[in-house]
Amino acid sequence: MKKADTDLFKLNLLTLRARLRGDVKALADIALHESNNSSMPIHMAELGSENYEQEFALSLMESEEDTLTAIDEALARIEGGAFGKCVECDGVIPKTRLNAIPYASMCVRCAEQKEGA
């Protein structure tokens, strides 16, 4: 892959990482605010709704943390010169896939096999 391409992917990954870090912080603030909220709900339904919102925020945080890890790994592959190569078969990951998922570590075939397993 050309250096200009990897530089563009690196910029996209850094931008995405910065945005996700902000999202994770906001979600953490929401989850912590919900758990530290001292006002007791009047109805049991309100309590259930607050618990659901907190669990949902925590679930989103976990998903975004996984994506942040994948982004950091992609940035390391850029630095190591392995970006754009499948970590499973060492084949080339198409640019169309990297444009859609810039932190993709596997080609479509390997990713499908892993998801099917």
Image (cartoon, rainbow, N blue to C red):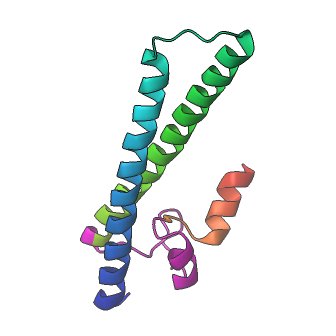
Residue 32 sits inside the magenta stretch: no
Indicate whether 97 appears above or below 73: below
Q: Residue furthest left?
A: 79
Residue ID at (46%, 17%):
37
Relative to the observer, which residue lies in front, 37 or 25?
37
Magenta-colored span:
79-103
Residue ID at (66%, 9%):
42
Q: Quadrant of residue 15?
A: bottom left
Instruction: Locate residue 20, reporting x and y percent.
Output: 41, 54
Relative to the observer, which residue lies in front, 17 or 40?
40
- The reply, left or right, for residue 114 in relation to residue 89 is right
- The reply, left or right, for residue 9 in relation to residue 114 is left
Q: Is residue 93 visible?
A: no
Q: Is residue 88 visible?
A: yes
Residue ID at (68%, 23%):
49
Instruction: Locate residue 65, reporting x and y percent.
Output: 44, 44
Residue 96 sits inside the magenta stretch: yes
